[in-house]
Amino acid sequence: MRKSFFLIFLWLFTFKGVCQEFSSEVWHDGFLVTSDQDTLQGLLKYDMESNIVQVIQNQIVKTYSSHKVFYFEIYDKIVSSYRQFYSIPYNVNYNYKIPILFEVLYEGPLSLLSREAVVQETVSNSSAYWGGSFVRDVVNYTFYFLDKQGNIDSYTGKKADLLAIMTKHERDVKDYIKKNKLKTDEIRDLIRITAFYNSL
């Protein structure tokens, strides 16, 4: 009997993890500023993979590509926080830029940006009651750094690459990471590191 209850609990926990809501899949209160400087307020939904933002106004859904978006802000009910996004020209091929959507995680002389995508990952289960593995959807983040000249560098999450981007204060940043035991591929720690770099 106890084993049956455990298996039911484990199944419910797994089902919840697989079927969880993601921020890009729900509507949020917010506003959007178009490239023509018009401001639209209402419910917003974004899709970074397609680079579009949808806005509901007066029960009408309007869709804007990143070419038509300057900025938008939402109150994300999933993470209970305000989030800001810009459409910024980015090199998709050599010498060819198009505007794509970025979230601003930290704004300063060196700004930290991110893009997200929902991807599938395989999780192994070593439980004595339920072995094997299952596939679940997770949010994967790609980070970028924007400098004062408007240059955007993609960031791999590796410490060596971060220090190369922050080469101006490499030693100070390296010591700060070590002293505070920070991880260079996690959002919260990366924001702290970027804030520290901008303070130097």
Image (tube, rainbow, N blue to C red):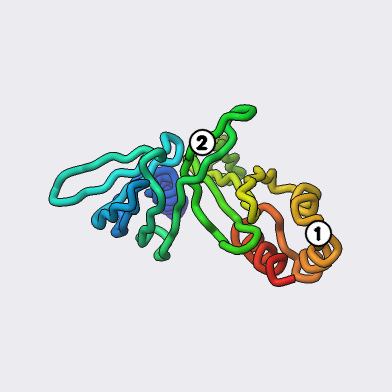
Is residue 4 at all visible to an observer of this figure?
Answer: no
Q: Residue at x 50, y 35 (%)?
A: 98
Q: Determine whether, in the image, residue 181 is placed left or right of residue 69.
A: right
Q: Residue at 22%, 48% (x, y): give it.
A: 56
Q: Read off the residue under disc 1.
A: 168
Residue type (three-letter) at the residue carrying disc 2: Gln
Q: Residue beneath label 2, please?
A: 120
Above-or-below relation of 30 to 129? below
Instruction: Give the side of residue 171 with respect to residue 87, left or right.
Output: right
At a point 62% along the width and 29% down the height, the residue shown is 95
Image position of 141 (left or right of 200) = left
Which is more toward the observer, 139 or 39?
Answer: 39
Question: Mark 1 or mark 2: which comes first in sequence?
Answer: 2
- Classify 173 as above or below 146: below
Residue 172 picture location, percent across and down = 82, 67
- Of labels 1 and 2, the one closer to you: 1
Pick the residue in front: 23 or 86: 86
Front in this rendered view, residue 26 or 75? 75
> For the point 40% across and 49% down, which residue is it?
70
Residue 124 in the image, given as x and y percentages of width and height? 60, 40
Residue 194 position (above or below residue 20): below
Measured as percent of width and height from the top left, residue 121 is found at: 55, 37
Q: Residues within 10 Å of mark 1 (few under 14, many from 20)?
A: few
The image shows residue 34, relative to residue 177, as above or below, that is: above
Q: Secondary structure at mark 2?
A: strand
Q: Amino acid at mark 1?
A: Lys
Kindly check if marks 1 and 2 are in contact, taking CB atoms under 8 A apart as contact: no
The quarter in which the C terminus is drawn is bottom right
* Residue 152 relative to residue 179: left or right: left
Q: Secondary structure at mark 1?
A: helix
